[in-house]
């Protein structure tokens, strides 16, 4: 008998000596029940839920909380809304990102200021709050950029303000 056979024979005898059929079924059943609970554990499920902050304020006013770092014409005044482009325009795939405090729940949200492109500039509701903006020579930190340069048409029309997540402060997890 080779080593392999002897090893399994010994294991089988040891299992037979230490457990009866009932014991085996009990352990097997417990394993099945335990395994079935694994998908119920709270594994990052919250990350998939959309972030929908409670709203207050007027999205066609420059004072609206989402616009804290915007530089552009508000799409809400141009036939679109704070998070959609007006008909006939295309949303830029590259954007300027800001962090704004929602006055309703006191939390900070990450806002993406996607430009809408393909029509000449809207011309109403110019809003320049510029929080976190740096001079254009720091191009990585400047919002004074036409993000339509990354779209099919480079013609800028207006800017949206889309919540893309909650901003957590370093350290306290809030
Ligand atoms: N992102 C708004 C914008 C567009 C064109 C030029 C400057 C700023």
Image (cartoon, grey):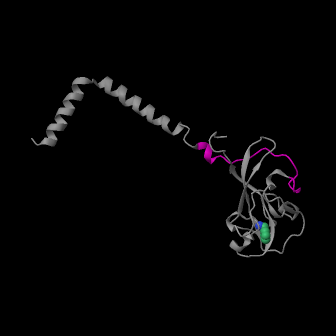
Q: Magenta part of the protein: which range?
A: 45-63
Report the quarter where the C terminus lies. top right
Q: Residue at x 73, y 65 (%)?
A: 142
**Coordinates of residue 154 in the picture (x, y in percent):** 74, 76
Q: Residue at x 29, y 25 (%)?
A: 21
**Coordinates of residue 30 in the picture (x, y in percent):** 41, 28
Left or right of 127, for residue 150: left
Q: Please, is residue 139 above or below residue 170 in the view?
A: below
Q: Please, is residue 82 above or below residue 7 in the view?
A: below
Quadrant in the picture for residue 112 = bottom right
Q: Which one is in front, 119 or 24?
A: 119
Q: Is residue 85 visible?
A: yes
Report the quarter where the N terminus lies. top left
Q: Main secondary structure of the magenta part?
A: loop
The reply to whether the magenta stretch includes residue 99 is no
Left or right of 96, for residue 62: right
**Coordinates of residue 166 in the picture (x, y in percent):** 69, 47
Q: Tell me how many marks there are.
A: 0
Q: Residue at x 83, y 63 (%)?
A: 75
**Coordinates of residue 152 in the picture (x, y in percent):** 70, 75
Quadrant of the picture in which ligand 1 is shown: bottom right
Q: Please, is residue 174 above or below residue 72 in the view?
A: above
Quadrant in the picture for residue 169 = top right
């Amino acid at each position: 008998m080779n080593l392999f056979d002897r090893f399994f024979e010994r294991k089988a005898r040891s299992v037979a000596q230490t457990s009866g059929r009932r014991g085996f079924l009990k352990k097997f059943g417990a394993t099945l029940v335990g395994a079935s609970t694994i998908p119920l554990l709270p594994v990052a499920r919250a990350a998939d839920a959309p972030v929908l902050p409670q709203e207050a304020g007027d999205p066609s006013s420059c004072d609206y909380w989402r616009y804290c770092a915007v530089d552009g014409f508000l799409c809400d005044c141009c036939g679109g809304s704070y998070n959609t482009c007006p008909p006939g325009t295309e949303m830029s795939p590259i954007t300027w990102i800001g962090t704004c405090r929602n006055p309703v729940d006191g939390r900070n949200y990450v806002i993406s200021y996607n430009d809408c492109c393909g029509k000449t500039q809207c011309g109403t509701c110019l809003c320049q709050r510029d929080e976190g903006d740096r001079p254009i020579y720091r191009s990585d930190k400047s919002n004074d950029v036409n993000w339509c340069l990354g779209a099919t048409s480079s013609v800028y029309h207006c800017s949206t303000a889309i919540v893309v997540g909650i901003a957590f402060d370093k350290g306290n997890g809030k």
